[in-house]
Each structure stands twice: as structure tokens, then as C-alpha cells.
Amino acid sequence: MPNDQAIEGDYIRTKKNNLFFDVKGLLHPKDRIISFVRFYPDTTGERFRKGIHYKKIYDLSERYSFLKKNYPHYLFYSTQLNMELQGVRREEIERIYTPRGYLQNLIAKTKLSKIEQNAFDLCKLFIEKGDIPEQSIGITGSQMVGLNKEDSDIDLIIYGTEVARDFQDKIPEIFKHDNNLRKYNFEEYKQHFRFRAAGAQISFNDFMKSEPRKNHQGKFGGIDFFIRYIKSPQDWKGTYYDYQILDLGTISMLAEVIDASDSLFTPCTYYINPVRILASKAPVKNIEIDDIRKITSYRGRFCEHAYAGEVFMVEGKLERVIFKNREIYYQIVLGTQKTDKMLLI
């Protein structure tokens, strides 16, 4: 991969302003990397790196507000994706941090901190018990860029389509037989509901219909961990410029999931059989309902959310997608608004 390329899970540090951005997606325009501001220098920040205090921005809307107020040149309008995005121009990149590179740094170190040791041990467990090749796993998040707290989550990336699918078959047994690895308990799910579902206008009971089934999250040695899976490059469909997307507005509908095999990846995808439109602010009169083919999201909270054969109520953004100037279909995108949801019926 060229030095100025980056994909989901990587972080970027800018030449000016010492800002850290987390990279989103796999396909990017020629002049910049689509990425969202995550850490910024602030004298009142509780995170500390190389003599500089930093603050972390969590909420997506807050990230946009921060850049609009302070660094608007990191915002751009994507004509391909038909929306305002955040991104760093390639000439403004000081360094790209990669999860696999960080894991290799830990392997080479003679002494690890507690959080480094926990993350390393989890990778080692998955390599040994899950048969993951060492080059197919890495550690991302705040510790990769030296901005973690003592109780920061362990964020892992697993690379490769077949590696990911094979590991998903093995991880339930790892949960059963490793004493340091476990699913969340009931009280911990309550905490995650308040953090992840805040503003989504869903009940805790609805949240719990899908959340306990997910194998990409839990506790390791008492620390939260989260796994993102990235497809092999040969499975990335097209280039950034092969897509032309039109935002049609919000829609809610009932849909049956017919294929959830790509639900573990980032971005996650569910191929659907539309059942009925419930409400829409999108112009749907001239749309054949069967042309709404899939649900997709770049947000981890929608991964492993549904199984094939299940019927869901889904609410999100309806998009018209033209691929390579030929194929036209519609998709529902989740995660751009707090109210987006996917609820098992």
C-alpha cells in the first residue's frame, strides 16, 4: 500500500495543528483520505502525549461542529457520496498509524504497560485459538496513537474476508473456554444501551433482542474489547469514483433479511427482501420497492445485528446508487442520524 493510503482502522496525524483523525471506509478520493477528527490539543485535556494535552471527541455531530468552528478546510463536499464529509488532504498528512504496525511494535518491545499487555494478550489468544495469521490482526484506537487512558477499550482489527469468516465460527468456543474472555453481563448491557442507543428512541428490551448475540464485543481481563472486520482488498467493490449516490431522505420500512453474511464487516451489509414501507420523507412513488436491495452502515453498532430469515423494522437514509454509470439500486444507510435504528419484529 502506498505511503499516503489508509483504510478503516488507521489513524492520521496532521502536519499542522497536531490533530488525529480516524479513517473511515476503504475507498477514498485521489486528493484526500476520508477520516473524522478524534483527538485535538487542548490544555484542559485529560489525555497526554509528548508534552501535549488532548481531548477526545465522541459524538459525530460534535466532530462536525468542532471542524466548522476551528478547521473548516478539513470539511469537503463529496459529489460521489452526495454529502459533506471530513478528510485530510494527502499533502497534509504527517503520519499514518496502522493497527498491524502497532501490534508489531508491541511484539518487538521488551517491556509492555498494563494496557499494552492486555491488548497484546488478546491478540495472542485469537492468533493461537482462532488460527488468525499474525499479519491479519492489529490493535487500533487510542492506544495505537498513545492517547489512551488506563481503562481505555481494546479495539482490534481483523483483516481478510475468509480469515474473518473462519474466526467467527471459532470465537463462540473461545468465549466458552477462556476464563479471561466473556460476554457482557446484564448491568453492562444497560451501560452500553445508555451510551450506544442514546437518542435512537428505542427501548432497552428492543436493544437486547440483538445485542447479546454479537460476538465482536465483550470483556477481556475486565476491559471492554471491540473487533472490526475488514474484507480482503480483492473484495472491495470498485473505486471511490465508481459510485454516484443521491440522498433521497429518510425512510422506515419492514424488511426481511435474506443474506447477513456480510454483517460482520465494516462497512456491514444486509441484503433484504422489502416487505412494506411504513413512512417516508423520500420520494418513493416512482421507486419499485424490490429495488431497495440492502441495508448498510459504517457504524459498528449495526454489525451482527440480524440473521437471515428475520424481519426487521429499519429506519435510516434512503439512497439511490449508480455503480459504474450502469447498475442502479437503492439502499438504506444507518448511522448518519441518532434516530437510525434496526429493530427485530
Image (spheres, helix red, strand yellow):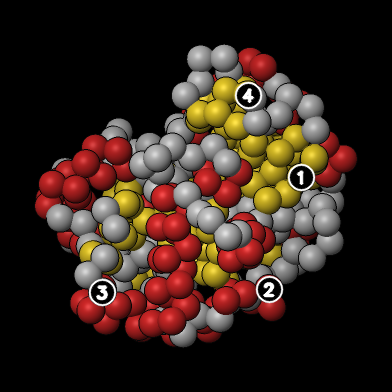
The residue carrying pointer 3 sits among few (fewer than 14), some (14 to 19) or many (20 or more) residues within 10 Å by Cα, namely few
SS assignment at label 2: helix
As shown in the figure, which amino acid type bears the numbered disc 4? Ile
Of the residues under marks 1 and 3, which one precedes in the sequence? Answer: 1
Compared with 340, 66 (above or below) is above
Residue denoted by label 1: 95
Relative horizontal placement of residue 160, taking residue 182 as reference (left or right): right
The residue carrying pointer 1 sits among few (fewer than 14), some (14 to 19) or many (20 or more) residues within 10 Å by Cα, namely some
Residue denoted by label 2: 233
Compared with 123, 119 (above or below) is above
Residue at image location 80% in from the left, 40% down from the top:
94
Residue denoted by label 3: 178
Nearer the observer, 87 or 252:
87
Of the residues under marks 1 and 4, which one precedes in the sequence? Answer: 4
Seen as rendered, the residue at the extreme right is 91
Of the residues under marks 3 and 2, which one precedes in the sequence? Answer: 3
Compared with 344, 62 (above or below) is above
**In the image, residue 52 lies at what x, y percent?**
63, 24
The residue carrying pointer 4 sits among few (fewer than 14), some (14 to 19) or many (20 or more) residues within 10 Å by Cα, namely few
Please identify, in this view, whether the residue under mark 1 or under mark 4 is nearer the observer. Answer: 4
The residue carrying pointer 2 sits among few (fewer than 14), some (14 to 19) or many (20 or more) residues within 10 Å by Cα, namely few
Of the residues under marks 1 and 2, which one precedes in the sequence? Answer: 1
As shown in the figure, which amino acid type bears the numbered disc 2? Pro
Q: Quadrant of residue 254?
A: bottom left
Of the residues under marks 3 and 4, which one precedes in the sequence? Answer: 4
Nearer the observer, 128 or 189:
128
Residue denoted by label 4: 52
As shown in the figure, which amino acid type bears the numbered disc 3? Asp
